[in-house]
Image (cartoon, grey):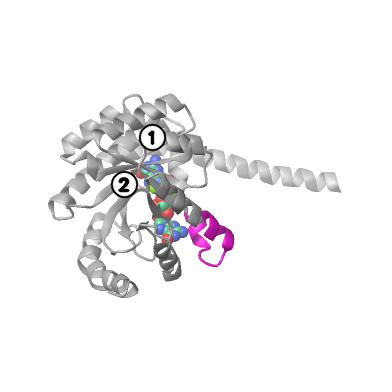
Amino acid sequence: QAKQSGRATCEIYDEELHELIREKQILERDAALGIQKDEFSLVYQPQIDLKSGALIGLEALARWEHPVLGQVPPNKFIPIAETSPIIIELGERLLRQACTQAARWRQGGLTNVKIAVNVAARQFKDPLFVEKIKNILEQTDLKPCALELEITETMLIDDFDVVEKTLGELNALGTSVSIDDFGTGYSSLLYLSKLPFQNLKIDRSFVHNLPSDSNSVAIVTSIIAMARQLNLSVIAEGIETCEQAEFLRMNECVGGQGYLFAQPMDALQLETWLRDDFVNTFHGRLGAMNGQ
Ligand code: C2E
Ligand code: MG
Ligand code: MG
Ligand code: MG
């Protein structure tokens, strides 16, 4: 009996595994084609100064409109693209697209707004990475200081010397680096203290249970305190409620990002949001929250 049900489970597992492998193969195959057919695009999510309500940054997030499957989420296609050289080309294209858009917006008056672009491990390890960044900035006429690169903790531990060199070169260029999903990776405090990056993004899993969960409170306030001591700026991800925003603001977290403020939007939607919602409702609401 037990043996039988064990075998049945095994078969289901096998089927699911096959399905997953098949899906991976399809996505892998189609991604390369999708790049040529321009199926990838970017949406932008505002990053807000929690005290002043000012717009401080825009995070560029990749979207893939697959001709048959429809929208494929980045959590699905980025890891697949990461396993092949496709990510290098895709990453470069998205970076160029983000910088082009950012340059346009800065010329249009968003002078203090940074564009934050996610970088995959394979891209970051590419020996030509910094060179490519330089070229893209030149070609798009974007100041290096207007670009922020988001990398994850796990990318720091790979090869300390290479990481240190790359970060040093980006520093010299004037482009800042942010550690994304902070608190969920495996980086050591020693590495963090030795490497030249500028910003920490508190992972949304810690923000989610604020302010009622005491463990989340402990972790978030510690990250903010540590960042201050290390002279790093902090952005909290995934802010969905006023209570979360208020807690973070009271605890001196400078930046915030999340559905409470805005969803990621395409360029046109963002321009409308800036003109209508941001100025009229959101900015006013934060002002009221701050007693202004
Ligand atoms: P991430 O860089 O940590 O981006 C934040 C994710 O949280 C985004 O998901 C965003 O839409 C989502 N988010 C924003 N506010 C909220 C909120 O209030 N609540 C919740 N629950 N979620 C929120 P998205 O766009 O699906 O991207 C997922 C991940 O895929 C990103 O996480 C990033 O790791 C990766 N990714 C996206 N675009 C790129 C890219 O161009 N290159 C690379 N290498 N990775 C990318
Ligand atoms: Mg990110
Ligand atoms: Mg994140
Ligand atoms: Mg993430």
* Amino acid type at mark 2: Ala
At a point 46% along the width and 32% down the height, the residue shown is: 83
Relative to 166, residue 180 above or below: below
Quarter of the figure with residue 289: bottom left
* Residue 240 in which image quadrant: bottom left
Residue 11 point in image, percent of width and height:
70, 43
**What main secondary structure does the magenta stretch of the protein show?**
helix
Horizontally, residue 4 falls left or right of residue 230, namely right
Q: Nearer the viewer, residue 97 or 66?
A: 97
Say what amino acid the circle numbered 1 marks.
Ile
Residue tagged 1: 87
Where disc 2 sits, the SS reads strand
Badge 1 or badge 2: first in the primary sequence = 1
On the image, numbered disc 2 is attached to which residue? 116
Residue 212 lies within the magenta run: yes
Label 2 beta carbon within 8 A of ligand 2: yes
Residue 284: x and y in percent read 27, 73
Question: What residue is drawn where x is 23% and y is 32%?
Answer: 134
Q: Residue furthest front?
A: 229
| Direction from residue 206 to residue 245 in the image, left or right | left
* Along the viewing direction, whichever of 40 and 134 lies nearer the viewer: 134
Residue 2 drawn above or below residue 84: below
Mark 2 surroundings: few (<14), some (14-19) or many (≥20) residues within 10 A: many
Question: Residue 70: in sight, yes or no?
Answer: no
In magenta, the rendered stretch is 204-219
Mark 1, secondary structure of its residue = helix
**The residue carrying mark 1 has its beta carbon less than 8 Å from ligand 1:** yes
Q: Quadrant of the C terminus?
A: bottom left
| Mark 1 closeness class: few <14, some 14–19, many ≥20 residues within 10 Å | many
